[in-house]
Image (cartoon, rainbow, N blue to C red):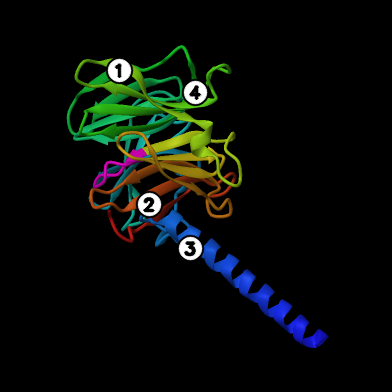
Amino acid sequence: MKKLVLGFCALGLLVACSAKKADKEEKEEVKGESIPYNLNKPVQKYLLPRALDEISGLSFYKKNQLACVNDEEGTLFIYDFVKKEIVKKVDFGKSGDYEGVEVVGDEIFVMKSNGKIHSFKIEEPFERDLDCSHKDVKEYEGLSYDPKKNYLLLAAKQRSKDKDDVKMIYAYNLNNQSLFKYIGIPEAQVKTDKGGKEFRPSGIAIHPLTGDMYIIASQGKKLLVLAEDGHKKAIVDLDPSLYTQPEGICFTPQGELFISSEGNGKSGYILQFSPKSVK
């Protein structure tokens, strides 16, 4: 009788464990439905030349090519990911803390951490400067563009101590040259099982097909996805063994995702992800 009871207990424990495992797998599957990329399995990893060991900004330039900046040198690098090499370099300024780059048509915008943006064109003599500094922002570290609204989007990595509990995305309206607070991200939106307070945005990009906003954080190792109206669609913990110091993020017009990372003493690199589907 004791053996029979023990047998039923063991069977019950096995069923419970199996149900718990299935429930966990189901939750993970549901969680993954809102983002059409497997961020643990890049389709390609590109090791970058030494000039981009400290790559800090990334943008789609044109077919097979990405625009890159590092955080010390006033030089734009055009990286061809099919040829796996830098195919063009453009000196645009002095040394500085450059943290973001965005290509809008034939205009290149490069942002310093203080919010000062310098823009230029590669094929013709054109330059202009935008001042997106803000009294609340200590450091910006991400630049993107919303084509529907004609806004440059700036991700604040750190704001003043009394305001930093809400991470802020600022927008610069290119139509009327005005800067304003665009989307606030409270701590509750970035909390996962691994916490949320360390979330400090380092890169931002707009998905070309869905309009969703992808915000990556090197400090906190997370990717937050917001819908166009600002509500959270997904929060993903990033594997630190794969993402050493992720700071750049961009998409091709077809929805291929690229994330760049500094190497922390080793080669900088870019990870490429193909969409599973687009919803």
Q: Secondary structure at mark 1?
A: strand
Q: Secondary structure at mark 2?
A: loop
Residue 206 lies left or right of residue 265; in this view the side is: left
Q: Residue furthest right?
A: 2
Q: Residues within 10 Å of mark 3 (few under 14, many from 20)?
A: few
- Identify residue type, mark 2: Ser
Confirm whether residue 28 shows in the render: yes
The residue labelled by disc 1 is 129
**Closer to the camera, 178 or 60?**
178
How far, Cα to Cα, is label 4 from label 1? 18 Å
Q: Residues within 10 Å of mark 1 (few under 14, many from 20)?
A: few
Q: Check residue 34 in the rendering and tell me which mark sits there, or answer none.
A: 2
Q: Nearer the viewer, mark 4 or mark 1?
A: 4
Q: Main secondary structure of the magenta part?
A: loop
Q: Nearer the viewer, mark 3 or mark 1?
A: 3
Q: Nearer the viewer, mark 1 or mark 2?
A: 2
Locate residue 175, reporting x and y percent.
19, 20
- Mark 4 vs 1, N-terminal side: 1
Q: Nearer the viewer, mark 4 or mark 3?
A: 3
Locate residue 227, reporting x and y percent.
33, 40
Residues drawn in magenta:
205-213
- Identify residue type, mark 1: Asp
Residue displayed at 26% across by 33% down: 146
The residue labelled by disc 4 is 139
Residue 5 lies left or right of residue 209; in this view the side is: right
- Mark 3 vs 2, N-terminal side: 3
Q: Are marks 3 and 2 in contact (CB under 8 Å)?
A: no
Confirm whether residue 69 shows in the render: no
- Identify residue type, mark 3: Glu
Magenta highlight on residue 187: no
